[in-house]
Amino acid sequence: MDGTRRRLAEEREQALARLAGLTGDYDAVVAASRDTNADDEHDPEGATIAFERSQIGALVRQVRRHLAELDAASARVEAGTYGICERCGSPIGAARLDALPAARRCIGCASAPG
């Protein structure tokens, strides 16, 4: 499990670095929008700035969700339930955990509807 802990910690560090970069990008877009006409409807740059702000905001939320998933995976490691499907209780395949270390479900349960 030390390898799993290390992998989750590395992924968490990468996600935090990405979050810091995105937060800086978001702050830059917001600062740029303060320097422009606040009327997005009539300002040709307004729609672009709003779109960029929306896109970066979505990426920030995605990284935060990923961090939460990594933290939950670390908790499962500590609890001894890492690698066990939360839905059916079967082992999650090694290939799936290599691709998605924070996976909560086996391939069968992840691809099942509902």
Image (tube, grey):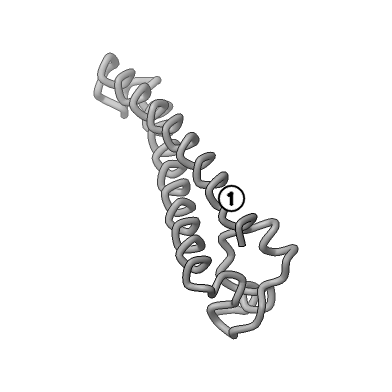
Rendering coords of residue 40 (x, y %):
31, 27
Q: Could you say whether the residue bearing mark 1 is in a helix, strand or loop? A: helix
Q: Give the side of residue 74 with respect to residue 96, left or right.
A: left
Give residue 39's quadrant in the image. top left
Rendering coords of residue 10 (x, y %):
56, 44
Q: Nearer the viewer, residue 6 or 103?
A: 6
- Type of residue at label 1? Arg
Q: Which residue in the protein does label 1 denote?
A: 6
Image quarter in which the C terminus is found: bottom right
Q: Which residue lies furthest to the front in this view?
A: 2
The residue at 44%/37% (across/down) is 19
Q: Nearer the viewer, residue 50 or 76?
A: 76
Give residue 104's quadrant in the image. bottom right
Residue 85 higher or lower than 9, as above or below: below
Q: Residue furthest right?
A: 95
Q: Residue furthest bottom?
A: 88
Q: Give the side of residue 42 with respect to residue 19, left or right.
A: left
The residue at 49%/36% (across/down) is 18
Rendering coords of residue 59 (x, y %):
46, 42
Circle 1 Cα neighbour tier, 10 Å, few/some/many (<14 / 14–19 / ≥20): few
Q: Nearer the viewer, residue 42 or 23?
A: 23
Image quarter in which the N terminus is found: bottom right
Residue 67 higher or lower than 48, as above or below: below
The residue at 50%/41% (across/down) is 13
